[in-house]
Amino acid sequence: MLNNLASKVGRVWRLIGTAICFLIFGLGGVVLSLLVIPLLFALQKNELKRQIISRRCIGGGFSLFIFLMKNLGVLSYEVRHAERLQNNTGTLIIANHPSLIDVVFLISFFPQAECVVKSAVTRNFFMRSTASAANYISNEHLLELLATCTDRLKQGANLVLFPEATRTVPGQPLQFKLGAAAVASRSGATILPIVIQCAPTTLTKGEPWYHIPRTRPHWVLEVLPPFRPPHLPEENVNSRQGIRELSQQLEELFEHALDH
């Protein structure tokens, strides 16, 4: 009975802690978009410096969010082979997408990385100025998206992508789209795979934030060895066979890691 009571109390506390964290996260986003970013545009005319500062603010906010979630007992996490997160240039960082906050983890690790955002973000009153200042990439037009991602990798930037393009449905196999493989093949960039697992599952696709699991969820982020895929010359970019093969290879790599 005592164990059952402690479990219920812990679950209620995690609900309260989650609400506090998301409230702070939301308020921080409003302050950033309505106060910090406008001031930044007014005071900093250099676009590149403005981008760096904006991304630093976003990365710092994401790190604070994870810090709060962990220290309030809402979640726990570990990063395996964290040394592989260091000294990456022109690297395509890909990850599976089991939960809502996966991108929060990744951007806290790589605050200056390029990031693809939904077109709805660039049209949202509260988020568009932040996305613009950070020079994030909109997914509105697929061909432009692929070209922009490829160009920025070739220029030496790191890029975070989720090959599934949406959150994984619990219990379903991974379904990688061809976009990440196409960007990797056309840019010739090194790929850094990060396998994300969360148990018990939470913040999954279609699940509201207040559905709190019975036990505290634990994230494991395993950084696999980086590798460079075969590069497709420009004259072969219309051939999809190599891209399909790489996408299948990536999907199998993640499935294997998730099974072990």
Image (tube, grey):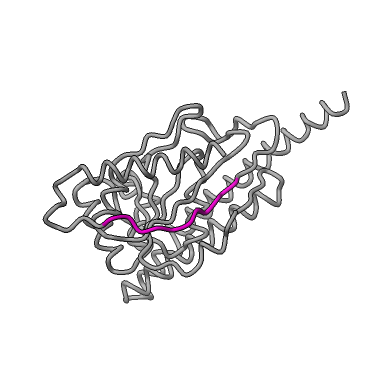
Q: Nearer the viewer, residue 129 or 108?
A: 108
- Queried whether the magenta region covers residue 228, the answer comes back as yes
The answer to whether residue 212 is above or below residue 247 is above
The answer to whether residue 108 is above or below residue 241 is below
Q: Nearer the viewer, residue 10 or 157?
A: 157
Q: Nearer the viewer, residue 176 or 214?
A: 176
Query: What percent of the width, then of the height, locates residue 80?
Result: 60, 54
Classify residue 253 by image quadrant. top left
The answer to whether residue 49 is above or below residue 29 is below
Magenta: main secondary structure: loop
Which residue: 25% across, 45% down?
243
Query: What percent of the width, then of the height, locates residue 111?
Result: 47, 63
Start-end of magenta stretch: 220-230
Viewport quadrant of the C terminus: top right
Classify residue 14 by image quadrant. top right
- Queried whether the magenta region covers residue 99, the answer comes back as no
Instruction: Looking at this view, name the residue that lies furthest to the right.
Output: 2
Which residue: 41% across, 55% down?
93
Classify residue 201 by image quadrant. top right
Count of labels in the image: 0
Query: What percent of the width, then of the height, locates residue 108?
Result: 52, 58
Q: Nearer the viewer, residue 40 or 9?
A: 9
Q: Is residue 3 left or right of residue 182?
A: right
Instruction: Looking at this view, name the residue that lies furthest to the top.
Output: 1
Viewport quadrant of the N terminus: top right
Which residue: 16% across, 51% down?
237
Which residue: 47% across, 61% down?
110
Instruction: Looking at this view, name the residue that lies furthest to the left.
Output: 235
Q: Is residue 82 left or right of residue 55?
A: right
Query: What percent of the width, then of the height, locates residue 15?
Result: 67, 36
